[in-house]
Amino acid sequence: QCSLSELMYYTWWLRTSSKLKDNKMFGTCNREKLWGLLCLIQLAVLALADLHAQPPPRRGMQRVPNIVLVENMATTNRKTPPAEMEPKFWNDLAHAELQKRINEPLNKNRAKNVILFLGDGMPLTAITAARILQGQRVGYSGEEQLLSFEKFPVTGLSRTYCTNAQVADSACTATAYLTGVKSNGLMLGVNAKVNYNNCTASMDPANHLTSLYDWAQAAGKASGFVTTTSLTHASPSGGYAHVANRQWQCDADVLEYDNDPNTCTDMAQQLISQQPGRRLDVLMGGGMGKFLPNTITDFFGNRGERLDGRNLLTRWQNLHPNGAITRNRDELLRVNITKVSNIMGLYGSRLMEYHLKADDNQPTLAEMTGVALAFLNQKPNGYFIFIEGGLIDYGNHENKLGIALDELLEFDKAIHLARIMTDPAETLIVVTADHGHPLSFAGFPERGNDILGLNNVAQGLDGIPYATMDYAVGPQQYMNPNGTRMDLTDKMGDPEFVMPSYIDLTYGVHSGEDVAVYASGPWEHLFTGVMQQNLLPHLMAYASCIGDGAKMCG
């Protein structure tokens, strides 16, 4: 048998040599040239034989897999609305959207109010899946739906990396979208000169950053935040805390990370006693334990977490004698917003519960948003408020997609309510995420296929169906002991089902792609294109004439 290199070599030699009869070595029978001729003859024979040989058996599909899948998909149109089969439907839809965009006037009013909605850990893939789930819950196929914020007139993309990390956490991102400065991961409200867990540097005022909370207060506006996590969670804390470790939520946490709480002021204490936290008009979320000493039991039957004996809720009430502290849905909805000076809501010892697991005593994000906006809408100079759907992130970390998407839909309800309760002529609403999660939406499932189910058109080469949605990294690979994939046909459907992941870890991770930005209201047109995440507060400040930077009011 001749090797390929031998065939190429001898073919070249024979073509470049003179005629055999002119070769001085012909008389001695040039073995190499004869060997080359034999190789060429062998190659020709093999080529002719291959023309008639049966091809070897192939595993799986006999055609390009993607073509086969698309052909399968093309034969399943049972859920396609009849109107969509007519070209007129699509042309009319496009023309209506075109006219809307042509006739959309530029809103250059001064933004009296600014609302920043943050979907923690909300990648574009989750937004797409949530819109489909929303439609499927009410009998539609789902793909044709839009969430309320997807109807905003302007969209852009935000770049989320930290100064020291390719993939961000919720601390460095909060610092970026609330202070306008990018910083290191795991830190809040300090510049990138501060190293992780460095108490001395983080307590140095020279390293502190001001935020939209500060800017609004300096302009005489009201301010506050609402979250489904805790009051000391990273996202809302990026605007009031100055720490080198996002876990310094109370004095016990500071000690746990080998620092002195008498030197490193914890986040709960900063929120209640320092600027701008002590001047916030609205505070709603979970995390009661961080504000109470470990010698008492909180409203939810759990011990407080503080070791210093401080009761920071009493401290807050003394600072705001006309303020209301609410601990459940009933207390929140009964607040007389015309008679209170401030509203604090604490609806859990730690995080709030997922919406699907909460009882009737826990208010929804929309209910918290409604009370907060009704209260703030009374303020003559306007306000800035940060509202976070924080448990989207936790659902994704657990790879419980059904939970994460439900939290996203609850987040959307709050945004929809905010649009109803405010005037777009004077209120700028911005919706974005801090970072994504490695969630994939794969294959060629049929229109209307259960978004939380298995692909109903294709299977893997092992003949086992796969989930339409799955995660790159997470706690469940679903492998049998022999290394084969499990068949999940009878396991999916529960919202708490842990979706499959490719890489096995105990906890899901973040992803580093850009996240979407949606804007509606005064100067909405500034929020388009691909932007650094830290640009967002500068744009909001410009539109509302707050802060030390450029302003629309000059």
Image: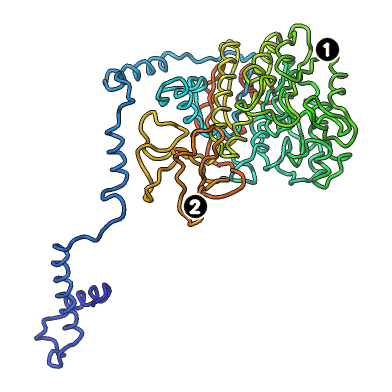
Give the label on residue 216, or none: none
Residue 521, image x and y in percent? 55, 16
Quadrant in the picture for the C terminus: top right
- Amino acid type shown at disc 2: Asn
Give the spatial CA distance, label 2 vs label 1: 61 Å
Please name the amino acid that badge 1 sits on: Asn
Judge whether 285 appears above or below 531 on screen.
above
| 429 on left or right of 362 | left
Q: Give whichever of discs 2 and 1 has the lower sequence position.
A: 1
Q: What residue occupies the far top of the structure in this picture?
A: 338
Give the quadrant of the N terminus.
Answer: bottom left
**Label 2 belongs to which residue?**
480
Pair 2/1: label in front:
2
- In this rendering, the answer to whether 81 lies above or below 232 is above
Depth check: give the residue in front, 426 or 283.
283
Of residues 541 and 402, the one drawn nearer to the viewer in this rendering: 402
For mark 1, what is the residue? 322
Q: Residue at x 35, y 38 (%)?
A: 457
Is disc 2 placed on a helix, strand or loop?
loop
Horizontal side of 12 relative to 348 (left or right) equals left
Q: Quadrant of residue 74?
A: top left
Where does residue 53 sit, x and y in percent of width and height? 17, 63
